[in-house]
Image (cartoon, coloured by chain):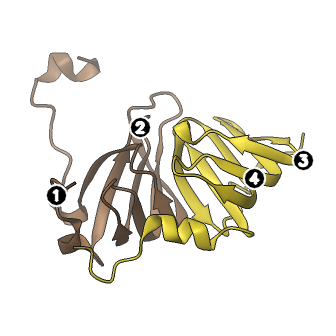
Amino acid sequence: KSAVLDLTNHVDKKVRVKFAGGREVEGRLKGFDTLVNLVLDESVEYIRDAEDPYKLTEETRPLGLIVCRGTSVTLVCPSDGMAEIANPFGEAAADGI
Amino acid sequence: NMGGTLLPLELIDRCVGSRIWIILKGDKEFVGTLRGFDDYVNMVLEEVTEYEVNPEGGYRVTKLDQILLNGNNVCMLVPGGDGPVAEVEEE
C-alpha cells in the first residue's frame, strides 16, 4: 500500500503531530511505517488549558524518545511550516463556531 | 522506501521486558513493565500504575499484577518512561 505523503523527506527534521482527542506533540522524526506509526526524539507535549481543552497553554512537558500510534495521528507537519493566525471567521465567531 | 529509519514497532519490541509509559488519547496514563503486544498494540503490562490526570494535580491509582491494555485508545508510548511523576497524590 503506497503512502499519500513520503515521510522520508522529514526524517531528522522537527515535526508537529496532532492526535485525535486533542493532544499535540513536537519532536524530531526518527522513523515511521506505512501505517503512520511514528518515532519522535527529543519530543515535548503541548499542555492544553484545563478550562478549555481546545486551547493550548504555553506549558510543555518533555517526553523524550516516543512512539506515536498511527491510529491516533490526525496531522503531521514540519514545525516551521505552521503558525497560528487570527480567526478568519471574524470576531463574532471567536467564542466558538 | 524507508531507508535507514527506525521502525516504530521495532522500538516497542525492544522495550519488551522494560518499563514503559503509555499515554492514552484521554487524560489517562499507565506505567508498567511491558510483557508483550500484538498487531493492534494491545499490551500486557505488569506492576502497573494507572494515572488519571486532573486539573489540580496528578491522581494516582496503583494496580499490581498483570493487565491487558486495550490498544484502541493508545496515543503515545515512551520506552523506559517514568510517567507523570511530579505532583501525584498517593492512593
Q: Distance between the residues labelled 1 and 2?
A: 22 Å
In this view, the residue in front, A74 or A8, is A8
Report crowding for label 3: few under 14, some 14 to 19, many 20 or more residues within 10 A (C-alpha): few
Q: Mark 3 lies on which chain?
A: B
Query: Circles 4 and 2: CB distance less than 8 Å?
Result: no
Q: Identity of the amino acid at label 4?
A: Leu
In this rendering, does residue B83 appear at all?
A: no
Q: In the image, are marks 4 and 3 on the same chain?
A: yes
Q: Supply the letter of whichever chain is yellow.
A: B
Vertical position of residue A82 compared to residue A94: above or below = below
Q: How far apart are marks 4 and 1 (CA)?
A: 34 Å
Q: Name the residue under label 4.
A: B45
> Looking at the picture, how far across and down is residue B58, in whole percent?
73, 43
Q: In the image, are marks 4 and 2 on the same chain?
A: no
Q: Identity of the amino acid at label 2?
A: Gly
Q: Mark 1 points at which residue?
A: A5
Question: In the structure shown, which secondary structural element does the residue marked by tag 3 occupy?
Answer: loop
